[in-house]
Image (spheres, rainbow, N blue to C red):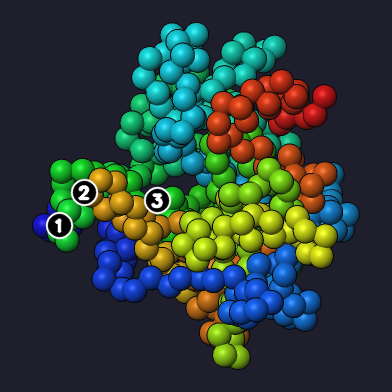
Amino acid sequence: MNLKDFITNPIELEYFEGLLSQLNEKAEHLTIATPENDTGVYPTAIAPRKLLRDELPFHSYEDIKQRYSTKEVVDCTLWLRKMHGGLGSSLDRSDYLKKYGRSTPGSKSTDLYIETEEFGAISLAEAQIIQASKKTSSFKKVVLQDLVNNDVKPILDEMWKKYEHLLNDNFSRLDSVIQQKLPTIKNGELSLERLAPAGHGVFGYEVFKGPRPEGENVIACIGNGEDLSSTPDRAIVNWMLTENIPVVMVTTTKTERDMKGGQIALKTEGDKTYLTIIEKAQAEQAGQLEYFEKLGLREEDDDAFFNTNLVLVNLNAVKDYKIALPDLIKNQKGEFLQLEGAMGSVLLNSDRLARDDAKKLVHILNVNKENRSKFFNPIKSMMDYNFIISYKKLNESNFHFNSF
């Protein structure tokens, strides 16, 4: 099979060929350090204090907010990139959609609705458009871009027609990035019998390589399309521009609700230390699931930093960094093997290259438990959605959720 004939986007081709090249490589298996077995892999909850201090570019949102808050419009272009591609098959909403005359599901963001006084019942994807238009009161220019698949794009395009009147010199839309369904592996060979997207790592890779808005001070923000909180405030952006911070991964202090998500960790190899993420699947594979889930919740632990999937990139500050491909994730679906990569893996592999040159690319910005809902209101199930609409109130002046 000639992939060039099938994958039309050269960046996605480069990304997929990178995943394919790892197919026969032995995957790295991370085992978390224990008192009995010091593997050199330390989630922040158990990392040696000196290692954290010397090797983790860590910042507290509360400190950033105090030091870099401003009431002025920040002189930058905020490039909001919202991921709408995932079907969210674990979120059963078939009966719910019938209330809105829908039978075919799109993404979570296009299928879940909120009530508003001005616009009536609108989807979360529509709310993202309205919210972005209001961000021009905080940032000189705002550009909204949808990260989608072919199934979701027509739904979003139809929604955008209702809000074209919001577009102006300060608020614009960039053409959607379409994540193509790609070949899978069957019997060791590429197959077109089953096509599947190759993970959200492509969006992390493409932000460095693809077309971007014009302007000198461009801050890209990649967040989940169904999460209205996945947008930075002026303090964060002002800090990144003032201090020339290249990449920020936003984390939040782990709570008992966060048993399954990835945790930021440090990994030592000889005299080098690298950033990594420990995922639930890795802990299961190592027989450490219970240990992994308790990290950060025990009395003797420091905070565990839980990954929110919210990423910020200062395009001025990343010009001289090499960008790496993600590690391959093998996702077996029956007789077919899907090749996938994660966005966090793109960033941390790139940070590893930078550290080999005595630089640091990725900074961790942790938001405490009290402020987490400002940037993180994930919807993994209808229970999460029902909690948000029951216990959060939409502030229609800025289209963010506030607690009652």
Q: Which residue is mark 1?
A: 187
User: Residue 199, labelled with which disc?
Assistant: 3
Tell me which amino acid carries mark 2: Glu
User: Disc 3 or disc 2, which is closer to the eye?
Assistant: 2
Q: Earlier in the sequence, mark 2 or mark 1?
A: 1
Q: From what the image shows, is residue 392 above or below residue 63?
A: above
Q: Quadrant of residue 225?
A: top right
User: Residue 335, labelled with which disc?
Assistant: 2
Element under label 2? loop
Could you give the CA–CA distance between mark 2 and mark 1, rounded to whole angstroms?
Answer: 8 Å
Lateral position of residue 335 relative to residue 288, left or right: left
Quarter holding the N terminus is bottom left
Q: Residue at x 34, y 52 (%)?
A: 331
Q: Residue at x 59, y 86 (%)?
A: 272
Tell me which amino acid carries mark 1: Asn
Q: Earlier in the sequence, mark 3 or mark 2?
A: 3
From the top left corner, tell me how far across and down residue 344 is, in percent. Answer: 52, 59
Element under label 3? loop
Q: Check disc 3: other Cα within 10 Å, few if <14, some if 14-19, many if 20+.
A: some
Lateral position of residue 4 relative to residue 291, left or right: left
CB within 8 Å, label 2 to label 1:
yes
Quarter holding the C terminus is top right
Q: Check disc 2: other Cα within 10 Å, few if <14, some if 14-19, many if 20+.
A: few
User: Residue 390, labelled with which disc?
Assistant: none
